Amino acid sequence: MAMKAVSFRPAVPGDEALILSFIQALAEYEHMSDQVVATPELLREWIFEKRKAKVIFALVGEKAVGFALFFHNFSTFLGRAGLYLEDLFVLPEERGHGYGKALLKHLAHIAVEEGCGRLEWACLDWNTPSIDFYTKGMKAVPMDEWTVYRLTGETLEQAAR
């Protein structure tokens, strides 16, 4: 399938419902819909008021066909910031046109433009189509020797006490 002309735009206040719709669609794809507690109000607060993350939409014409949510992290070894891609999602009916690759290339451009040392993300182990795309299509290197750890909810509260 040929890719239609794609453009990108950053999310702006007022896009909270659109961002949430992509989050919910991603959660459904990942069989994690029950874990979504985000609301438009929370997204407004954390993305636009506190500026803790950024969102970019991939557009075909005026239609948002994909999104990426990312933020800066920091590498002590490189001594510079990087971009961490939290989520990238292309609507199921829009897949196969190259929009996901275009989003990743756009994020790579942002990282290079900002002088970041790397662009990284995580992928669920069962998501073979994405893993194949990342490793074969984008030449990304899996970090097999690393394990992600997480504190959340009550365990996070306990750790803070």
Image (spheres, rainbow, N blue to C red):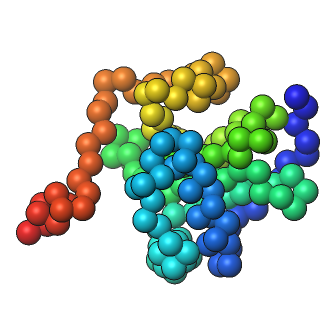
For this orientation, the residue located farthest to the left is 161
Q: Is residue 97 left or right of residue 2?
A: left
Residue 18: percent from left, percent from top: 67, 66
Judge whether residue 81 can be spotted in this image.
Answer: no
Q: Is residue 128 left or right of residue 97?
A: left
Taking depth in this image into account, of 78 and 137 the one nearest to the observer is 137
Q: Which residue is depicted at the point 63% across and 56% down?
A: 22
Taking depth in this image into account, of 25 and 85 the one nearest to the observer is 25
Task: Quadrant for the C terminus, please.
Answer: bottom left
Residue 137: percent from left, percent from top: 67, 23
Q: Which residue is depicted at the point 88% across and 36% down?
A: 3
Q: Which residue is depicted at the point 81% across and 55% down?
A: 59
Task: Quadrant for the N terminus, please.
Answer: top right
Residue 132: percent from left, percent from top: 59, 21
In the picture shown, does residue 141 fall above or below 28? above
In the picture shown, does residue 36 fall above or below 76? below
